[in-house]
Image (tube, helix red, strand yellow):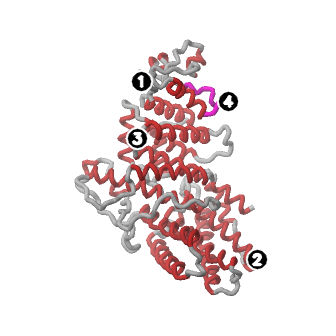
Amino acid sequence: MTVITESTSASFAENACAACREQKRGCDKTLPSCGRCTRLNRSCNYLWHTASDISPSEGLAVLLRPELDNPEAPGLDVDLLYCNMLHQALEEHGSTLARLVDEFLSYSLPWFPVVMERPFMESLEKLGHKHNAHTALLALTMLLVVQGTRPDRATNPSHRNYILCKDLYAALQLRRAPSLQLVQSGLLIALHETGESSPGAASLTIASCARLGYSMKLNIDDGSGYEDYLSWEAAEERRRVWTGIYLLDRVIYQIATEFKAPHVLEDLADHFRLPVDDACLRTNKTQATQAPSHQPVSVPVDVPVCYYAREIQAVRFLGEVQLLQRHIDVNSQPEKFESLDHRLMQFAERLFEQTPQGWAVLCGANAITITAALALHRIRIDRAVKSQTLGASDDAEASLLALTSFLNMVRDTCDNFNMLSAQEKIPSAPLPAVVCTGEAVLTGIRMKELLGEQFQLDYEPFRLTLLYARKSWKLADRYLQQMG
C-alpha cells in the first residue's frame, strides 16, 4: 500500500517530522506529510515524541490544531492522515496489512463476523491509490483486536493504539457522515474494551455504535427481496453489524455488574432476518446468481441455521434473563421465570446436540447459552436468600441443582479443553467463552458462600482455561483474581 502522496493541505506541524529530525535535515513541516518524505515516498511521522513527551491524544491535537486555530485555512487531508497512522501502527507492531487481515479473519471473524471479507478486501485494494479514513480506521481497530493483552500498559503498543483508535473514532464522527465501516470500527473498539475488563468504557462505546446504527437505520429489516447478489451482500453486512451491536451490548451488560443503565438496543423484531452461513458468501461475486434465503430471528431451534445465527438466538435469551433480573420479582411472578427457564432449556438441549464439539472448543453460542442459564438460576437463589426461604423453597432447591449441573458441565468442558495439545487449541478464545468460564467461577463462589462445606467444586480446570485465555483477554485476570 502506497501511503504517502502529494498533500494539498496548507497546514503545518509545530515540529519537524521524525525522519528529518533523525537525519538532521530541513523539514518544511507540511501536514500530513512533509515535502521531503513525499518525494522519497516514505512514511512521515510527526508524532515521534508521543512515547515520552505527550500522549497520542495530544499528538493528534498537534496535527489538528492549525485548523482549529484558523478555520478558514485549507483543511488537513484527513484521509491521508488516517492512512499514515495505520502505516505507522503496522510498522510499530512489526506487521503488514496482509498479515493483519489474515490474523483477524482467522481468529476473530469466526465468532464475531461483523466485517465481511470480500467488501473489506475491495476497500483495502482501493486504499492503495485512494486514501480513505474510514477504511484505515477499521484496519487500525482490527490491529487493536489481534494485538492481544500485554501486562505493561504504559509501554504497550496495544494501549497506545487503543488511545489513538478512540481519538480517531471520535474525530471521524465529527468530521464525516456515518458509514458502516465507522460503526464496525466502534464495534471492534468496544470488543477490545470489554476484553480489557473496561465495561464502563465499552458501554459508552457500544452506545455510540447504537446511535450511529439507528441513524443509518440498521435496525430496520423490512423483509424485502434482493435484485442481485451485491444488494443482498450489502444488506447482509448491515444485519451482521446490527446483530453484532446487539450481541456485544448484552455481553457487556452481563459483566458490568454495577452498571445499572438499560440495554442500549431494543430487542430484535421476530421478523428480523438472521445472518447466513459464511459458505453462502462468495469471494468472486460472478459465481453467485441469486441471494441465499434467510430465516427470521424467531425460527425454531430445530431449523438449521449458521453458528453466528445461533449466537444471536442465544443472546436473546441472555437479554431476557437480564431484563428479568432488572424489572420483576421472580417470587411474585414465577410463571415468567418458569416460561423462560423452559424455553432456554429446550434451546440449550437442541443446541448442544447440533454442536457436539462447539462448546468443547469454547465457541460463542454454547457459552452464551450457559451464561444465560447460570444468570437465570442465580436470580432465583438471590431472591430466595433475600426472602429467607432458601432452605424451605422447592424452587430454590431446583435452581441449586440446576446450577450444580451447569457448573459441572463447564468444569468438564474446561478439562477437555485443557487436555488438548498446543496445536489443537484455538489461538484466541472467543470472548463469550471467557465470560462463561468466569461467570461459572463467580457462581461457584456464591454457592460456597451460601452452602458452606455442603458445596465442593474443583476450580483448577477453570483456572487453567482462564490462564490460557488471558493471552487474548485481560478480562480473564479479573476472574482469576476472584478465585484468589
Name which of mark 3 and mark 2 comes first in the sequence: 3
Report which residue position mark 1 lands on.
5
Element type where label 1 sits in the image: loop
Give the x, y percent position of residue 328.
57, 74
Up-down relation of residue 238 to residue 61 (above or below): below
Query: Real-space Cα distance between discs 4 and 2?
Result: 52 Å
* Marks 3 and 4, the one that precedes in the sequence: 4
| Mark 3 lies on residue | 177
Answer left or right for 2 relative to 454.
left
Residue at the (70%, 74%) spot, across then down: 447
- In the picture, the quarter occupied by the N terminus is top left
Q: Which residue is mark 2?
A: 452
Residue 47 covered by magenta stretch: yes
Give the alpha-carbon distance from disc 2 to disc 1, as whole Å. Answer: 69 Å
Q: What amino acid is labelled 3 in the image?
A: Ala
Q: First in sequence: mark 1 or mark 3?
A: 1
Decide: few, some or many residues near mark 1? Use Cα within 10 Å; few <14, some 14-19, many ≥20.
some
Q: Which residues are magenta?
A: 45-56
